[in-house]
Image (cartoon, rainbow, N blue to C red):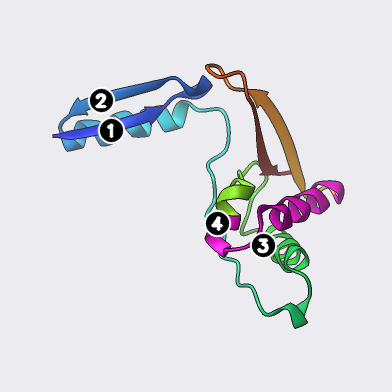
């Protein structure tokens, strides 16, 4: 038996209890129905500060991934808070890198309201 929590579009949460194979098939069907891109895992290696500020290193590496076609148009980038936690840096550094990528036209920012709480949710995707 598998108990899985699934986030559907508009953030309605449903809990499924079923056999493992059925759960995988249902998850695949639900993921195929979402209209926003899948979040890509980004491998970013930070060097010491002599290589430049953190936001410049992040910006340059994401721009290189986009130009090398490792990230395709429509692919969702990880949330700034998640990427900052993964890299153990301040969230503001990642937000500034995303802002500069957005300003250069490589990344698109979209905002929407959460269905249940009414909070604004910001997502970033490759333009």
In space, the residues marked 2 and 1 are separated at their CA atoms by 5 Å
Q: Is residue 40 left or right of residue 16?
A: right
Q: Residue furthest front?
A: 90
Q: Nearer the viewer, mark 1 or mark 3?
A: 1
Kindly indicate whether the residue at mark 4 contacts the one at mark 1 (C-beta within 8 angstroms): no
Confirm whether the magenta stretch covers residue 108. no
Q: Earlier in the sequence, mark 2 or mark 3?
A: 2
Disc 2 and disc 4: Cα gap in Å? 30 Å
Q: Which residue is denoted by mark 2 in the rendering? A: 16
What x and y, as percent, mark residue 23?
24, 32
Q: What secondary structure is marked by label 1? A: strand
Is mark 2 in CB contact (under 8 Å) with mark 4? no
- Return the residue at label 3: 65
- Residue at image point 68% right, 42% down: 124
85 within the magenta span: yes
Which is more foreground, mark 3 or mark 4?
A: 4
Q: CA distance from mark 1 to mark 3?
A: 33 Å
**For the residues carrying marks 1 and 4, which lies nearer the camera in this image?**
4
Q: Residue at x 67, y 24 (%)?
A: 112
Instruction: Identify the mark at residue 28; answer none if there is no mark.
Output: none
Residue hosting label 1: 4
Q: Is residue 35 above or below residue 103?
A: above
Q: Are marks 2 and 1 in contact (CB under 8 Å)?
A: yes
Mark earlier in primary sequence (1, 4)? 1
Q: Which residue is mark 4?
A: 85
């Amino acid at each position: 038996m598998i108990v899985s929590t699934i986030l559907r579009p508009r953030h309605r949460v449903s809990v499924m209890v079923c056999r493992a194979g059925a759960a995988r098939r249902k998850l695949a069907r639900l993921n195929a129905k979402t209209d926003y891109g899948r979040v890509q895992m980004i491998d970013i290696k930070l060097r010491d500060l002599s290589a430049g500020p953190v936001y410049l290193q992040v910006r340059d590496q994401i721009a290189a991934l986009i130009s090398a076609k490792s990230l395709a148009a429509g692919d969702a980038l990880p949330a700034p808070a998640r990427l900052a936690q993964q890299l153990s840096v301040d969230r503001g550094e990642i937000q500034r890198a995303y802002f500069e990528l957005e300003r250069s036209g490589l990344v698109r920012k979209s905002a929407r309201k959460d269905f249940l709480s009414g909070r604004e949710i910001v997502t970033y995707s490759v333009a």
